[in-house]
Image (tube, grey):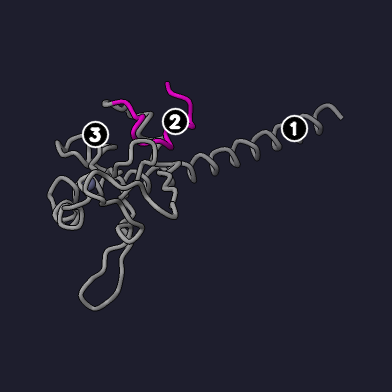
Amino acid sequence: MLPFCTWEEISDWPQTLTNHNIQEIVINGPVNRQLNSYPRNYDNRSFSLSFFCRKISNGESHPRSWLIYSEKVNKIFCFCCKLFNITDTSLARTGSADWRHLSQNLTRHKVSVDHIENFGNRIELKRRLQSSKTVDCSTEKQLLNEIDRWNNALKRKFP
Ligand SMILES: [Zn+2]
């Protein structure tokens, strides 16, 4: 198993993740460091902070919570598609640095069937993990109550 800190760097993730890896990543979430400027490529284009939000026609902007920029490789990834590894696109595998077509690629990716499924699976898994954590806490509380009852019973029997 990889040490926890490496999950922060999406480009370091192994091609195939175990269920345990996926759970750890979903719980801890992706890390997106926002930079003041991004490196320019051969045609003087670069990633930009504005890509983390999508502007819609009424002027509102919606965050692209699934978009991860890796400073290490100067590429972007789709967090949920990389996580579930069933989409054969650069956003889900090796990352994309096609800044020229980024806007249209992101728009296309967001409505792709695989992305919608992966996005939903990520939300569902996070919800399940959070609720199982809650169950664990209440089980632990029941156990502690049980121990208290036994201790009290023992004290009564052997004062
Ligand atoms: Zn995706």
User: As displayed, is residue 120 above or below residue 92?
Assistant: below
62 up-or-down from 26: above or below? below
Q: Which comes sooner in the sequence, label 2 or label 1?
A: 2
Q: Amino acid at mark 2?
A: Thr
Q: Amino acid at mark 3?
A: Thr
Image quadrant containing the N terminus: top left
Return the disc, 1 or 3, that comes first in the chain's sequence: 3
Residue 94: mark: 3
Tell which of 48 and 91 is nearer to you. Answer: 48
SS class, disc 2 = helix
In the rendered image, residue 117 lying in the magenta stretch gets the answer no
Q: Nearer the viewer, residue 148 or 95?
A: 95
Q: Which residue is mark 2?
A: 6
Work out which quarter of the rendered image holds the C terminus and state it: top right
Q: Which residues are magenta?
A: 1-14
Q: Please name the residue shown 40% across and 44% down the image.
A: 30
Vertical order, 55 against 115 (above or below)? below
Query: Residue type at mark 1?
Result: Asn
Residue 120, percent from left and from top: 25, 50
Q: Which residue is mark 1?
A: 151
Indicate yes or no whether the magenta region holds residue 9.
yes
Query: Which residue is farthest bottom?
Result: 58
Q: Position of residue 139 (x, y in %)?
A: 54, 39
CA distance separating discs 2 and 1: 44 Å
Which badge, 3 or 2, comes first in the chain's sequence? 2
Near mark 1 (Cα within 10 A), the count class, few <14, some 14-19 or many ≥20, is: few
Residue at mark 1: C-beta within 8 A of ligand 1:
no
Q: What residue lies at 26% left-to-right and 68% top-to-bottom?
A: 55
